[in-house]
Image (cartoon, coloured by chain):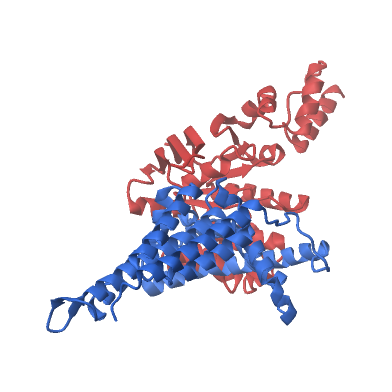
Amino acid sequence: MIKDITIGQYFNGNSVLHRLDARMKIVLTVAFIVSIFFCKNFWSLGLMVLFTIQTVIISRVPLKMVLKSIKPIAIIVVFTSLLNIFYISGGTTLVDGRYIDITTNGIFTALFMATRIVCLVVISSMLTYTTTPTMLTDAIEKLLSPLKIFKIPVSTLAMMMTLALRFIPTLIDEIDRITNAQKARGANLDDGNFIQRIKALVPIIVPLFVSSLRRAIELADAMDCRCYGGPGRTRMKQMKLRFRDFAALAIMVAFIAGIIVLNYYFGAVLIK
Amino acid sequence: MPILSAKGVAHLYNKGTPSQSKAIYDINIDIEEGELVGIIGHTGSGKSTLVQHFNGILKPECGQIIVDGTDIWSSKKATREARFKVGLCFQYPEYQLFEETVYKDISFGPKNMGLSEEEIDKRVQLAAEYVGLPKSLLDKSPFDLSGGEKRRAAIAGVIAMQPKVLILDEPTAGLDPRGRDKILEMIKSYREKTGSTVLLVSHSMEDVAKIATKVLVMNNARVEMYGTVDEIYSRSEELREIGLNVPQVSKIFEILKKSGLNIGSAYTVEKAAERILSLGGASV
């Protein structure tokens, strides 16, 4: 059923990561993603993997869910690894084929790339697992608010994002209802070739559009009635940086410093 | 042989998740051909879930749904046939309209049945006549109709399949009193003209009393009672216990009876007027 699709992947919990300020989480995630590409040797790579594992443990998100987020990128990881193994030259040559060489550099690059991609996806999914979509949009709005100087309507954009997220479950219900109604009139949605299947969607898409437009107009009226758009809008939930947010920032700074030190101390693993 | 029967049917919500719950269970009913059954119950008592099993939109967790002698889940063909034998009109059916003209929209069902052009035309005209849509509206866009007209056009779309059993889920929801009476009158005359079985889901005891021959009461995901209008409405104490109110006139008649007046019982205003008049006639 269409209802099984999970939109947003918030995992309800109460870990430290859940309670961190969403703005801080976004900033730290970006910092981590940048630092991923600093790692030049196995020591710093190891530190990064340790950090990632530690984050997952702290979040108390079940391992099964974390693995689920990696699943879609498995093919990309395997593919890039293979390309790297076959096409990167340099270092000691292990296999000397007629068309392809396998070198230590190739294997190391593949290993680095795979680890980086996996860590990147795991950490960014930690952000969405521990932050509700509304908190995320609020945080994005706050982080982008300096752009208001350039006359960019940041809060309007954020409201649009919030509304879009809010109406996804409603639309899914609506699709379900319309689909059932047309099925009751004998609509055949499961059989036929590609063209027939596309055509069979018309009886569902047209009513869906009609009701979405109606809903949008009603919502706009309701917002107007409550004077949306007036100046100086305040928030029910004020975002406030606490001690734990600064502690998290300190940990991230220490982590990046650690990576730089390890890089400097042990040198690069790839041989030019 | 009953036209429609359910044997030990149960359905679960959110199966396999912590919030799993019984939507309906232990459903055993036989509905005879030609009846007009009012299905009443509280919001969330399982009325809509139950009727969605009758044409195979929902698949029961266990048990059988038998339409016209065949188990509708015995084969893919049987399931598809059930869709046409049992016409189900959902709540707020006007939101299913999609074609350019009302005519085309009503013909959607018959077209899916693979009928000939002539047959489709005949059925569309007939269905429009049953629901009282004037011919001039058939070439209009369904989105230009009024709310009540849209509702009737959508119901015509189901009637045009000429199902043996017609199920209407809250066909009067959100309509004004006049629109409501029009739809009820239409359902009644449709059944009288075609002789088909009709199931009417409603939470209005008044509406059901007006046109139904039998009443099925749902409560807490089960069938609580099933019987003729007289049988069910006379059990007003039990009905009240499960939160259903008998019509106001029946209450008045109950009080009259208690105070010693031999007046019988009535569930609709018309019937009540008749009774009172006959009482007057007797005394004159």
Nearer to us in this view, A261 or B266: A261
- Point out residue A179 in the picture as x, y percentages from the top left corner: 51, 59
- Residue A100 position by quadrant: bottom left
Nearer to us in this view, B10 or A218: A218
Q: Residue at 56% x, 67% y: name it.
A: B105
- Point out residue B228 in the picture as x, y percentages from the top left corner: 60, 31
Horizontal side of residue B245 vs B191, given as left or right: right
- Point out residue A59 in the picture as x, y percentages from the top left corner: 50, 50
User: In this view, which residue lies farthest toward the top?
Assistant: B260
User: In this view, which residue lies farthest toward the front?
Assistant: A265
A9 up-or-down from B26: above or below = below
B198 up-or-down from B123: above or below = above
User: In this view, which residue lies farthest toward the right?
Assistant: B284
Chain A colour as displayed: blue
- Point out residue A226 in the picture as x, y percentages from the top left corner: 82, 61
- Residue A166 position by quadrant: bottom right
Q: Residue at 38% x, 42% y: name it.
A: B69
Q: Residue at 68% x, 62% y: name it.
A: B149
Horizontal side of residue A99 vs B142, given as left or right: left
Chain shown in red: B
